[in-house]
Amino acid sequence: MKIAILGAGAWGSALGVSFSTVHEVCLWTRRPQACALLATRRSGPYLPDITLPDALRIEPD
């Protein structure tokens, strides 16, 4: 199943990490700068101890 999550805050990131183990997930953030940081660091400011899996796509648009 393909899932899109609007918002890359704590809640969206947690859902994305959880769902990406079984589904194709795209995490959307409205700011391109935030998208680039999430994509390169594979972690966010709200959940710094959680690594975003490679299967989780991060998109600005």
Image (tube, grey):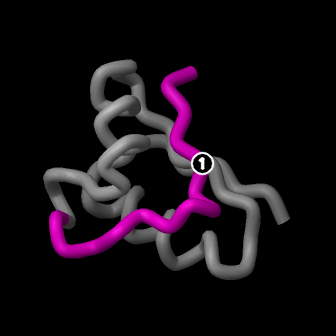
- The magenta span reads 48-61
Label the magenta part by its dominant secondary structure.
loop
Check disc 1 and give the amino acid type.
Arg
Residue 26: say if magenta: no
Residue at 39%, 32% in the rendered image: 35
Residue at 38%, 60% in the rendered image: 13
- Percent of width and height locating residue 21: 64, 79
* Residue 14: quarter of image: bottom left
Residue at 56%, 61% in the rendered image: 54
Up the image or down, 7 lies above or below 2; here it is above
Up the image or down, 40 lies above or below 42; here it is above
* Residue 24: quarter of image: bottom right
- Percent of width and height locating residue 53: 50, 67
Q: Image quadrant for the N terminus?
A: bottom right
Callout 1: 10 Å neighbours few (<14), some, many (20+)? some
Q: Which residue is tagged 1?
A: 57
- Percent of width and height locating residue 31: 34, 21
Q: State how many labels appear.
A: 1
Up the image or down, 56 lies above or below 15; here it is above
* Residue 61: quarter of image: top right
Asked whether, in this view, residue 60 is left or right of residue 14, the answer is right
- Percent of width and height locating residue 34: 29, 30
Residue at 37%, 42% in the rendered image: 40
In the displayed image of the protein, which residue is found farthest to the right? 1
Residue 53: say if magenta: yes
Asked whether, in this view, residue 41 is left or right of residue 21, the answer is left
Label 1 residue SS: strand
